[in-house]
Amino acid sequence: NAGVTQTPKFRILKIGQSMTLQCTQDMNHNYMYWYRQDPGMGLKLIYYSVGAGITDKGEVPNGYNVSRSTTEDFPLRLELAAPSQTSVYFCASSKGADSPLHFGNGTRLTVT
Amino acid sequence: AQSVTQLDSQVPVFEEAPVELRCNYSSSVSVYLFWYVQYPNQGLQLLLKYLSGSTLVESINGFEAEFNKSQTSFHLRKPSVHISDTAEYFCAVSDRTGGFKTIFGAGTRLFVKA
């Protein structure tokens, strides 16, 4: 079982560039999430979705955009990369609010 | 708004000693509580969860956590740790007022010494 798949694993961006972090899950989960992890800060929720066509902001949404056109995919878009967006990004999915999150292996992004 | 506070950023402990990792949350309604573990260079894995019922929940590798509604706490304990327990541990909460999104604490790094 693939579970939650994130691509790419690593990426270096120049300031002002844009990119899309891909996330797909094959568990038919309704809930999907994007988190960023910074040292000593834990995981901060960027955006989440409770189903196809429904997205909502998390704790730190500024500078990011998402879409959820299918149950399987939940891409995260960075429009104008800034050094403050250097982080490790995790995508996760779950069946519902009372279900544990299944995490991808993360994308390490550096903006210089 | 929901929030999670992990009171210790790092906890060093000797092998076979007991350990407690503290977690407090803020929420005014029923909550779901989770502990996740992250080993170096990996994603997070579920350790244990509290949804309802018995306030003491256990994991398969000897960890346990107790839900205390009056103190809004969900501390993680293990009576005897192993070197392999060295990892970062995250407490997380989701509740109805938060739209059932899951919020994480800042994490506690457990370092087990021989």
Image (tube, coloured by chain):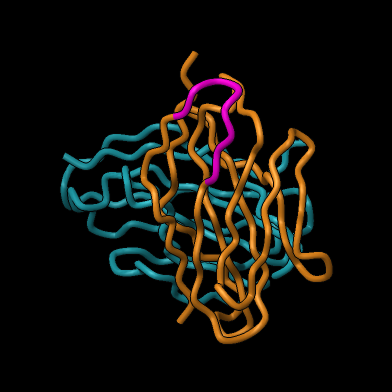
Chain colours: A cyan, B orange
In the picture, measured across the screen, residue B30 lies left or right of residue B44, that is: right
Image: B29 above or below B103: below
Q: Which of A81 and B23 is in front in this view?
A: B23
Image: B81 above or below A50: above
Q: In percent of the image, x 68 and y 44: which residue is there?
A: B47
Q: In percent of the image, x 69 and y 41: which residue is there?
A: B63
Q: Which of A53 and B34 is in front in this view?
A: B34
Instruction: Give the percent coordinates (x, y) of residue A19.
Output: 35, 49
Instruction: Give the position of the N terminus of chain B as an image quadrant.
Output: bottom left
Q: Which of A34 and A43 is in front in this view?
A: A43
In the picture, measured across the screen, residue A9 lies left or right of residue A92, that is: left
Q: Which of A94 and B9 is in front in this view?
A: B9
In the picture, measured across the screen, residue B43 lies left or right of residue B32, that is: left
**Over which residues does the magenta segment extend?**
B13-20
Q: In percent of the image, x 51 and y 70: which residue is there?
A: B25
Is residue A55 on the magenta stretch? no
